[in-house]
Structure formats: structure tokens, C-alpha cells
Amino acid sequence: MPMQNLERVKARLARIPDRVKEAVDRRLSIEAGDLAAAVQRAAPVETGELVASIHAERNPRRDLSYRVIVGGPAPLSVEFGHRAADGSHVPARPFAYPTARA
């Protein structure tokens, strides 16, 4: 279902004063950094690579948008579990999604 009145909404958003946008951007940056720190605390630590890879950054594609990046060695394998090289099951150790949802 397409969004109705999209152009009207875009026009109204374009009229938001720069000082308001700057204040919102500062707050979003703080919140994204806090979320990244919480995800780091929740991440399992084996070598430290996974924890060290977690950070917040500005989303280059959208204004007033940040994202928390979880890189490191196979973060999805840790989050959701996987099959080891010997065929055994390595259980999931979810940390990012539950932390973001909390």
C-alpha cells in the first residue's frame, strides 16, 4: 500500500529548522552509541574480535539515521547457531537482537 500524501510529508519535514535537526542528530548519535555499548557487553567473548567489531555509525544513505554494526568473525553464526566442521551443532548465543529489543 503506497504512503498517501508522501510529497506533503516530505515538504513538512524539509521545513524543520536546522537547529532541531542538529539536536535530534546529536541525540540519535548518543543513543546509537549506547546501544552499541550494550551489545558489546552482551556479546560472547572468546577472542575479543567480535566485541571489538561492534560500533555505531551514521547511516550514509539517510539523514538523521544511525546503525549499529556487528562485524567480526561470523556474527550470524554466533547469533543463530551453526553446524561445526565436524558436523556437530553449535548452539545459538543470541546477543545483538535481544539487546536491541530490550
Image (cartoon, rainbow, N blue to C red):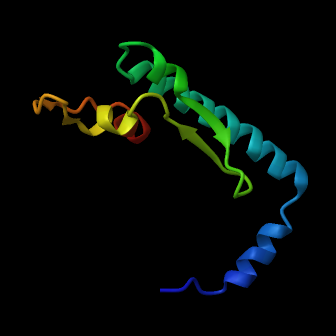
In the current view of this chain or complex, which residue is farthest to the right? 18
Left or right relative to 65: residue 11: right
Nearest the viewer among 86 and 83 is 86
* Residue 34 against residue 9 in the figure, above or below: above
Number of labels in the image equals 0
**Residue at image x 59%, y 44%?**
67
Nearest the viewer among 33 and 13 is 33
Quarter residue 88 falls in: top left
Quarter residue 62 falls in: bottom right
Q: Position of residue 8 (x, y in %)?
A: 74, 82
Which image quarter is the C terminus in?
Answer: top left
Left or right relative to 86: residue 96: right
In the current view of this chain or complex, which residue is farthest to the front? 86
Q: Position of residue 27 (x, y in %)?
A: 70, 38
**Residue at image x 43%, y 39%?**
100
Q: Position of residue 21 (x, y in %)?
A: 81, 52
**Residue at image x 83%, y 62%?**
16
**Residue at image x 75%, y 44%?**
25
